Image: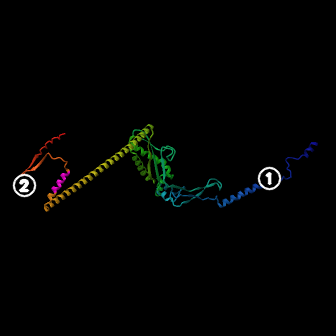
Amino acid sequence: MKNATQRSTLPSASVPTTQAVSPSPAVNRIFGRLVRRYAAVAVLSAALAVGGCVPYKKPVFEEIAPNETGFLIPLDDDPKSGQTKFESEAYLESRKVATKRQLIDQRWLKTGYFWLSGQYIPTQRLIKVSRSPITRVWTQSASTGTSTRDESIHVESRDSVNVSIGFTLTMLIPEEQTARFLYFYPSGGLAGVMDAEARSRLQQSVQTICSKYSFDELRNYKQEITDNGSRDLKEFYLARGVQVTTLGMVGGLSYQNPAIQRAIDESAIAQQLKSVNQAKFEAQKRENDRRLLEAETNQAVAIREAETRAAIAQKEAESRANAIKAVNAALAQTSPFYVQLQQIEMQRELAARWNGSYPATYFSAGAGSGGQGPLMLLQVPAAAATPAAPR
């Protein structure tokens, strides 16, 4: 009985108690916060589901520089024009845009189950083709070329001597040829075309000419090498919408073998010295010829002047003699005393010239005919010796 009484006083585990348990204030705050958050999410989801809203589409603009030509290409299928027309030059020409600021169209691409799972992607692509000229300088030196690498054109002569040649190339895309260029080169970059394709084609054309001549002959055909490369590049790229403006050789020919290059340099120096000496010799020869010509000219002038003076003097003497003869003749005819006057003048001249001695011979007029007979040459007798006076 005692055990039964004791067991009856203990509470039974299977009988629920009637006392209610109240939650703590912290639990109430957490529960209320969760209810409000999920309620807001439910309201926003319901609003999106009813209105079909997506995030705001921010506009995307691209600008086209004045030296560029833009082509607006659709990225999605275009039922009106057809995506297959993209491969034609005419289609690219039709997609050319004239505006300098272009709005790129976008569409919403859903990527998940929720309404906000997605992103805006462009439905158009703007390809810009630069029309500015581009120049490349391919040389062996790191300080003279476009790049610091050795980008010179390496070729072989007919006798298998390695030669490197530097070139400069300038190309541009005319505005009316931009669609054609984009058809052949969809990337739209001229610089890449020059560094890869144009340089390789120039290598081929230069090798074609160099393989025809020996290394010693190549120096005489540099113009042919440049002309052939320029002609080949212009013809090839004209059909691709690119204009080749200039192609020139830079630095001449450089031989990879140092001994050959040194021999050529020494030969060039010797040739230069020879040219300088030849120029000096020709200059001196011209100076000598000038001096000789000047002396001969002066001599000829002096001779002509002397001859002229002599001729003038002779003419003057002849004129005076003729005048004297004329005067004498006139006087002889008009005055009987003219002959006597002349005889007196001659005697005076003889007296002035007489040195005090007599001539050894003299002429005597013959007798008869008034003293006009034949002349006789008579010997003057020697004077008798005078005896000396006595002392």
Q: How many marks?
A: 2
Q: Which residue reaches farthest right?
A: 2
Looking at the image, which is closer to me, 342 or 233?
A: 342
Which is nearer the eye, 95 or 391? 391
Name the residue located 42 percent from the left edge and 51 percent from the top edge: 234
Amino acid type at image mark 2: Gly
Vertical placement of residue 214 versus 15, above or below = above
In this orientation, does residue 306 appear? yes
Q: Which residues are magenta?
A: 342-352
Side of 182 where 16 appears, left or right? right
Does residue 1 appear in this view? no
| Front disc: 1 or 2 | 2
Q: Position of residue 378 (x, y in %)?
A: 10, 46
Q: Is residue 257 above or below residue 108?
A: above
Query: From what the image shows, is residue 381 above or below residue 329?
Result: above
Q: How far, Cα to Cα, is label 1 from label 2?
A: 201 Å
SS under mark 1: helix
Q: Quadrant of the N terminus?
A: top right
The location of residue 24, given as percent across then percent down, is 82, 52
- Count neighbours of disc 1 (C-alpha within 10 A) and say few if under 14, some if 14 to 19, many if 20 or more: few
Please check the rendered image and state whether residue 345 is part of the magenta-colored stretch, yes or no. Answer: yes
Residue lying at the far left in this picture: please name it.
368
Tell me which label, 1 or 2, sits earlier in the chain.
1
Q: Is residue 295 magenta?
A: no
Amino acid found under the numbered disc labelled 1: Val
Tell me residue 270's x, y (percent): 40, 40
Identify residue for label 2.
Answer: 370
Residue at 65% over, 61% down: 51
The quarter holding residue 344 reads: bottom left
What residue would you read off at disc 1?
27
Q: Which residue extends farthest top?
A: 259
